[in-house]
Amino acid sequence: MDKTDSPSATNDLVIGEDGLARPAWAATGMLRTYYDTEWGVPVRDERGMFERISLEVFQSGLSWSTILTKREAFRTAFDHFDPDRVAQYGEKDIERLMSNSQIIRNASKISATINNAQATLAMREQGGLADFVWSFKPQITPEPRRFSDIPTSSEASAALAAALRRHGFKFVGPTNMFALMEAIGIVDTHLIGSHRRGSSGVWVAAD
């Protein structure tokens, strides 16, 4: 989760009208639905992993809420992030994407996504992208009580970013790869006391 999405007034949990505790950034609307149903849920398939990495590429420098609002448009524009299809994109596809006002029209990020699809296909010979990313799961996860306790990167995310770059991926750094690890359950940064803490099944919930 991009830290710019959190209200600056508080870093603590808030109790919703349903009686459930959530961080302030996920208290209402679209972000609440995303928090309750997707954020931190394990993703272990190639297409899903490629989509999450691609969205993290486009999120760079922007808020996650911006990406979430445009996610369905991204899925349509990028053939639902099928890496086999995206890897074949050429100049006409780049022109099509650059003219699509419903997505983020950034030539460097579009080119990086096509490049990353090609790198994803190449990784199949080594066990596949999803298993590769999960191999960087650390032995411990943060146990934050306040939003300010959550790191923005880690040794594991730096190692993952470096390894992906060695495999030809672009626009992957320690910060957006840590956000990826949060989003797909490799680390659990749900605040202690949140109704979602420990819900991924990957980590035991802390009291």
Image (spheres, rainbow, N blue to C red):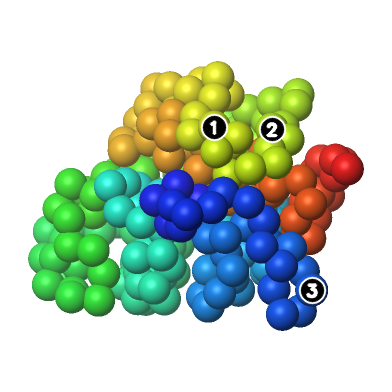
Q: Which amino acid, mark 3?
A: Gly
Image quadrant assignment for residue 13: bottom right
Per the model, the C-alpha gap separating discs 1 and 3 is: 27 Å
Q: Which amino acid, mark 2?
A: Pro
Query: Mark 1 touching mark 2, by CB under 8 A?
Result: yes
Taking 194 as reference, is 1 left or right?
left
Please state which of the two labelled residues, at mark 1 or mark 3, is closer to the viewer: 3
- The answer to whether residue 89 of the structure is visible from this angle is yes
Identified at 63% across, 43% down, the residue is: 146
Residue 160 vs 181, above or below: the answer is: above
Query: Mark 1 touching mark 3, by CB under 8 A?
Result: no
Question: Dot 2 corresponds to which residue?
Answer: 142
Which numbered disc, 1 or 3, marks the residue that appears first in the sequence?
3
Q: Which amino acid, mark 1?
A: Pro
Residue 142 vs 191, above or below: the answer is: above
Is the C terminus in the top left, top right, bottom left or bottom right quadrant? top right
- The answer to whether residue 85 of the structure is visible from this angle is no
Q: Secondary structure at mark 3?
A: loop
Per the model, the C-alpha gap separating discs 1 and 2 is: 8 Å
Query: Mark 3 touching mark 2, by CB under 8 A?
Result: no
Q: Nearer the viewer, residue 176 or 122?
A: 176
Question: Dot 3 corresponds to which residue?
Answer: 19
Identified at 14% across, 65% down, the residue is: 98
Image quadrant assignment for residue 71: bottom left
Question: Dot 1 corresponds to which residue?
Answer: 151
Q: Secondary structure at mark 2?
A: loop
- Local packing at callout 2 (Cα closer than 10 Å; few below 14, some 14-19, many 20+) is some
Residue 12 vs 149, above or below: the answer is: below
Marker disc for residue 115: none
| Residue 196 rendering spot, x and y as whole percentages | 75, 58
Per the model, the C-alpha gap separating discs 3 and 2 is: 25 Å
Identified at 79% across, 60% down, the residue is: 195
